Image (spheres, grey):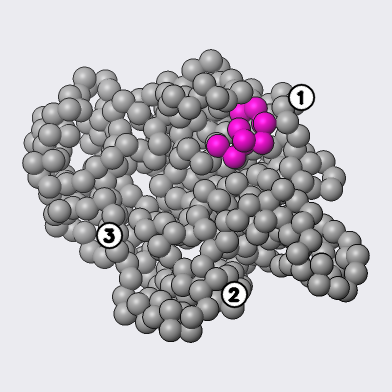
Amino acid sequence: MFYELAAPTWGPEEIDAAKRVIESTFTTMGAEVKAFETEFAAYFGAKHGIMVNSGSSANLIATAALCFKTERPLARGDEVIVPVLSWATTYHPLQQYGLKLRFVDIALETLNMDVAQLEAALTPATRAIVAVSILGNPAALDVIRAFADRHGLYLIEDNCESMDAELGGKKCGTFGHLNTFSFFFSHHISTMEGGIVLTDDDELAHLCRSLRAHGWTRDLPPDSPVYSRKSADHYEAYRFILPGYNVRPLEIEAAIGRQQLKKLAGFTAVRRRNLALFQSLFQGDERFIIQRENGKSSAFSFTIILNPARNPDRNAVFVALTEADIGYRIITGGNFLRHDVLKFYDYDVVGGAAPNADIAHDYGFFVGNHPFDLEPQIRRLHDVLTTVCK
């Protein structure tokens, strides 16, 4: 395809790292995972990194950890404020732990949670908030963290789409009590599958380590704050303290991740150069609504919303993109309220509706961005859209 939605980012370094692990014959979670956790946490200035098998699993164990805290754990029926536009596994762990979701509409110009509605979203039952930066564009994380601190709420920052973005000189994925990242094929760095949780909280880190591997104590030190060691015998290595999971990563994923991490800053710089070209072509054109950059975007992709005031024909646009060999898709997961799975949720919607998310759902799409020069692709995109949207 002339303009792909996703593209590989591996070079010979990643292939060599994978071969090295295979040749060692030690493939389960071990030294490479530990090294990658340390290096990734250091890049973001975090105290703890807990690698897992996907960003979705990172959200799962982050939610679970808050439910098993010694003091003020989340409990079934507690409310969590969430944006109405995100990926499904931002929400599913909350539902699976019996939490009620309070959906907040997005700000159309950024596609992130409309923080002007936060006070209206707050009730006496509110205990947490999930912040999501959509497709590389930082949410108002400073405002959201201040709101959480002011009201004694836990903040989970789902940063799976926005690795290496910054707000006020601070990396996204460092504003929350727990922060999650994804290493899926199409994301900023790829380990095939994979994810990680970052936190500065010792208890939450130890809970996440136990939860990712069956809920046992094997990966915890003797002075862990989440359990008391009973003996020195072989039973302790197989002692189960939490109803955990098996969401461990593989050594091969971590070895590849260590090579990808070395390239992340360069990848982001190229993505941002592509973003600058995209913005120069589309910004100010009333036919299109593109994301207003908040802070410093890491430019996962380029979002375009056809201005509904001009009565656009989105089907005609999609036909033109297909004929031009340009890939496109829905913005993240679209308006989550419009998915069938909501019948299993306990939720309500602040203000009763999410009109901006509906606009993004009905008139929006995104095209890919990659860590290499895309000038020919972006210019063809612009030519096609300016022709079909006369």
**Near-viewer residue (387 or 59):** 59
Amino acid at circle 1: Pro
Q: Residue furthest top?
A: 352
The residue lying at 68 percent from left, 60 percent from top is: 209
* Mark with earlier residue (3, 1): 3
Task: State the SS at label 3.
Answer: loop
Residue 26 visible in image: yes
Near mark 1 (Cα within 10 A), the count class, few <14, some 14-19 or many ≥20, is few
Q: Is residue 21 left or right of residue 171?
A: left
Question: CB atoms at circles 2 and 1 under 8 Å apart?
Answer: no
Query: Above or below — where is 187 with respect to 153?
Result: below
Q: Indicate the position of residue 274 as horizontal and vertical percent values.
A: 28, 57
Residue hosting label 3: 7
Q: Which of the 4 quarters of the picture holds residue 150?
A: top right
Q: Which disc, if any, is residue 124? A: 1
Residue hosting label 2: 30
Instruction: Point out the image quarter for the C terminus.
Output: top left
Discs 2/1, front:
2
Q: Indicate the position of residue 170 as horizontal and vertical percent values.
A: 57, 58
**Near-viewer residue (351 or 33):** 33
Amino acid at circle 3: Ala
* Mark with earlier residue (3, 2): 3
Tell me which segment is drawn in magenta.
92-101
Magenta region includes residue 96: yes
Q: Which of the 4 quarters of the picture holds residue 208?
A: bottom right
Discs 3/1, front:
3
Magenta region includes residue 309: no
Discs 3/2, front:
2
Q: How many marks?
A: 3
